Image (cartoon, rainbow, N blue to C red):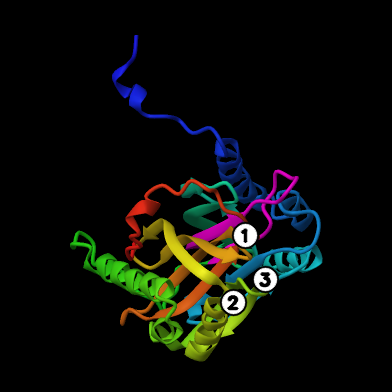
Amino acid sequence: MPKATDVFDPEQHGIEAVIRARKVAEQHFEYELSNDPDEILVSMKSFDPMFTTILRDTGRGSNDVFRCDTVDEQREFYRSGREHMDMIETPMFTSIGSDWYAFVHGLTGSRLKATGDMLHSEIIGVLPTSPGEDTIAGEIGLSFPIFGKQGDAPGAVAHERVASFGLLRRWLAAIQQRDADELASLYTDRMQGALFDPVQGAVVTVRGKVGVRDLYGAAFDAYDGLDVELIIRLIDRWYIFAELRWRYDEQGDAKMFRTADVFVPTPENEVIAQLGIGTRAVVAATDRVGAATGSHGAG
């Protein structure tokens, strides 16, 4: 006998990859507690390239981009970091799986070796999964920065998140309209980031409005029939996370790739930092739900 909820179909395709991504992301932070670089690397990709992109010293006001492109660089990153402190706890209170990455938001607690003092940091990360291994392929993220938006006061209505929502809507609209100048206007000149360049199929370092305009302008010029849609939008008091689907035409075939980015907005609602990653391009599915409406929207 049919049940009332039989109208909902549980799509099984890809769900195991979603569960896997969440598990390997959380597993990585458990390995971090060993404070042994080689032990931590067990939870990470065993072959090059590595895709770690972080902002270091955000608590001191720096938005400089730091990257690890190889396993050896990743090992040295952990070795140098553990010289002065040990990580004691890593509660990830947000853990969202995708079929190619996991997004986490949580805390890290570390003890300074020289004094025994404890330091706590609030962090976010996008952790892409490795092909053929139950590991992550890098860490993309940062800890709560002093140069970004600090959020609403405790108990206050979430007006600052609404303002960040407005910034993301304008950002997405500029991409959908292929307007590189408008897109660049949403960034501060101090912006530093590591963005996925669809033309190169690689993550590249980008600085300032000009860098943003050049990267996205080249992408807009490279693809015919470009159609970009929002997959995930997550807005917290100090960051924005967004995943997009990019669809385009190539010699009569429909292709698509996906991108995932974290943004730090300033109190003036300009983007001061952005870190991202993207997938390879594949043939797009022929069935496009809602395509008949022709509506793009701004997320």
Q: Secondary structure at mark 3?
A: strand
State which mark lies toward you, 1 or 2. Answer: 2
Crowding at label 2, few (<14), some or many (≥20) Cα neighbours within 10 Å?
few
- The type of residue carrying mark 2 is Ala
- The type of residue carrying mark 3 is Ala
Q: Which residue is mark 1?
A: 279
Q: Which residue is mark 2?
A: 222
Q: Position of residue 235 (x, y in %)?
A: 36, 61
Q: Residue at x 50, y 88 (%)?
A: 208
Q: Secondary structure at mark 2?
A: helix
Closer to us: 120 or 197: 197
Of callouts 1 and 2, which one flags the residue occurring earlier in the amino acid sequence? 2
Magenta region: 119-141
Q: Which mark is residue 202?
A: 3
Image height of 6 relative to 121, above or below: above
Q: Position of residue 211 (x, y in %)?
A: 54, 87
The reply, left or right, for residue 131 in relation to residue 205 is right
Q: Secondary structure at mark 1?
A: loop
Residue 83: quarter of image:
bottom right
CA gap, disc 1 and disc 3: 9 Å
Does 136 lie within the magenta span?
yes
CA gap, disc 3 and disc 2: 15 Å
Instruction: Farthest residue to the front: give it.
Output: 252
Image height of 33 relative to 146, above or below: above
